[in-house]
Image (cartoon, rainbow, N blue to C red):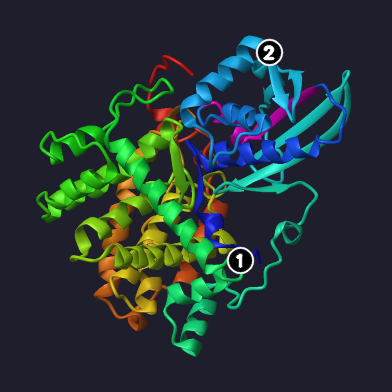
Amino acid sequence: METISIFDIFKIGVGPSSSHTLGPWKAALHFSKTLSNIKFNKVQIHLYGSLSKTGVGHATDIALQLGLLGYLPETIDTSEIATHLTNIKNTSQLQINDLAITFEPNADIIFENYALPHHPNTLTFIAYLNKQQVTKTTYYSIGGGFIEKEGESKQELDTHVKLKFPINKAADLTKYIENTGLPIHEIVYENELCFNSSKIIEEKIHNIYNTMLQCVYNGCNKGGILPGGLNVKRRAYEISTQLLNGQSLPNVKEWMNAIKKTKADFTAINKWVSCFALAVNEENAAMGRVVTSPTNGAAGVIPAVLLHYVLFATKQLSENNIFEAIKKFLLTAGEIGCLFKKGATISAAVGGCQAEIGVSSAMAAAGLTEVLGGSPGQVLMAAEIAMEHHLGLTCDPIKGLVQIPCIERNAMGANKAITAANLAIMSKPENAVVNLDAVIKSMWDTAQDMSHKYKETAEGGLAINISVGLSEC
């Protein structure tokens, strides 16, 4: 089994897709480093399977160019992306490791019309010197921004960190809880200390939360039409403005304080949770900065549920106490994501949308249950309930864009997570018929049985039954 940190599950990056944008971006960065001691004057990239079929809609071609240029998805100024692309187009040149080479995106990024057998998200980089091939590397984008290089085992790609509490299944986690008496978030924290110091862990959690929060705020304060040609109108801005009675708040802090003062009945809270989730995935669709949770396409669920807790489910807590709750939430949610990554998949190209929205909903349900004071059994039960009611969810994006039905699905996943948490807290885990390990296995079985048409190919479901005209690509 892989040794995974929760910070492998929560990655800061750029939308719209972790498998189709972030993964290829990281592959391009990795390949560019392998060229540091090689003479070359041309690079071509071949995309296969799902990467080819929906790559343009997922900005795969854009990500590849930015990765080869050496920009990091965590730190790139997203407002400058269009300028970088225009420069390549106008000059027909791309700079790799300080070497300027001739590069024509339309000719040198090749969308193959077939898949390779190992993985539906496969891409191959080839470097040439005077038309002679000098090196060739194939990568697999396996979901959540994770990549594998052909010819390297998973063991070779692992960090080789020895965890205090090795966890491959929920049953392992339960065993450690029974033996130590520790809650789930403390078990996970002890494992994270095997990767990083406590100071770095806290810094990473601060960064993840602040990135999520800024993303929600940006999405709630930006109107207009999303790029891609479907003419999808942003809705989070209108919902937020309506719920705030037309107020325009200049920063995150004032915006959050204003929300706390609004009506907080069931209907209003439900609208806010949906608004938060829509905001993130509208930003994601526009190549904004998001946190994979565990993927970009499902990035809105956890921020929405976490903000539900911070804004509506807490009394007057100090900033320190709120941060401790956020840490508990993310540690717990992250571990649930790790379990699904190890036991099934977090890639829609492999398992349909149950692997993305379903997993994110299970993660959020577990995190919320933990901070609401649920027992470890109730936390795992909440994750199970959330996934159980996403089993079989297909991935059928219209025109391959992470917009319809993806954006709304985040709102549905967030609200299902809250319901799952509330059901679990009111239940006795010992009476449950289904456990988390069983639902993870069921999800994997379902993924293997699911038609390829419903695995991020835009060849089934809504993708072929909704007729739309694209004004741009």
Q: Residue at x 21, y 37 (%)?
A: 249
Task: Estimate the x, y position of residue 204 in percent, counting from the top left.
Answer: 49, 57
Q: Which mark is residue 195?
A: 1
Determine whether, in the image, residue 126 is placed left or right of residue 232.
Answer: right
In the image, 200 versus 74, the foreground residue is 200
Element assignment for label 2: loop
Residue under the image location 40 percent in, 17 percent down:
469
The spot of residue 115 in percent (x, y) is: 68, 36
Pointer 1 local density, CA inside 10 Å: few below 14, some 14–19, many at least 20:
some
Q: Quadrant of residue 130?
A: top right
Res 440 seen here: no
> In the displayed structure, does residue 234 sit left or right of residue 437?
left
Q: Which mark is residue 92?
A: 2
Residue type (three-letter) at the residue carrying disc 1: Phe
Q: Contact, CB < 8 Å: mark 2 with mark 1?
A: no
Residue 373 position within the rendered picture, expressed as x and y whole percent measured from the top left: 29, 75
Quick check: is 45 in the magenta stretch? yes
Query: Which amino acid lies under the numbered mark 2 shown in the image of this protein?
Result: Ser
In the picture, the quarter occupied by the N terminus is bottom right
Q: Secondary structure at mark 1?
A: loop
- Which of the two discs, 2 and 1, sits closer to the camera? 1
Along the line of sight, the residue nearer the viewer: 167 or 433: 167
The residue nearer to you, when weighing 460 against 208, is 208
Give the magenta part as a residue range: 42-56
Residue 339 or residue 443, whichever sits in front:
339
- Can see residue 344? yes
> Is 155 located above or below residue 47 in the figure?
below
Quarter assignment of residue 344: bottom right
How far is mark 2 from mark 1, CA to CA? 42 Å
Q: Position of residue 388 (x, y in %)?
A: 39, 62
